[in-house]
Amino acid sequence: MYRIRRTTFPIGRAVEVPRYQIEAAPGNKLELIQEVRRLRVDFATFGARAVACATDIQPEGWEIRGLIAVDAVAFEHALQQAMINHTSRKFGAVIGNE
């Protein structure tokens, strides 16, 4: 994971973000498996609204603390499954602990 805080979000910079593969796991869960490759993400292309969303503290009190890259199609399928099962409010991941 590329560790950040909302105050250190790489606004206007390009960074190498670790890639993860999404795998189905038993019990209707997903497993994230880190790949060797990284993905270069240019945050200079992000609009003001996207940056504001990424750097805000959410109403529940959480904030983004790290960035990873996943396949968009696999992520969409996983999110659709979570919505079908009415668990989309719990959709997310915690990778590591501080």
Image (tube, grey):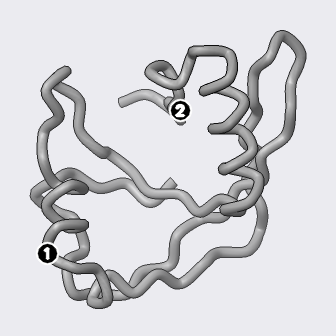
Question: Which amino acid type is shown beneath numbered disc 2?
Answer: Ala
**Picture quadrant where residue 80 is located:** top right
**Residue at 25% in and 74% down:** 10
Question: Which amino acid type is shown beneath numbered disc 1?
Answer: Ala
Q: Where is residue 11 in the image (x, y as percent from the top left)?
A: 20, 77
Q: Distance between the residues labelled 2 and 1?
A: 25 Å
78 left or right, relative to 68? right
**Picture quadrant where residue 26 is located:** top right
| Element assignment for label 1 | helix
Q: Nearer the viewer, residue 55 or 50?
A: 50
| Element assignment for label 2 | loop
**Residue at 13% in and 26% down:** 59
**Residue at 74% in and 59% down:** 73
Residue density around tag 1, few if under 14, some if 14–19, many if 20 or more, within 10 Å? few
Q: Position of residue 6 (x, y in %)?
A: 16, 53
Q: Nearer the viewer, residue 28 or 13?
A: 28
**Picture quadrant where residue 82 is located:** top right
* Dot label at residue 93: 2
**Vertical relation: 42 (above or below) 76:** below
Q: Where is residue 74 in the image (x, y as percent from the top left)?
A: 76, 52
Q: Name the residue under label 1.
A: 48
**Residue at 57% in and 16% down:** 87
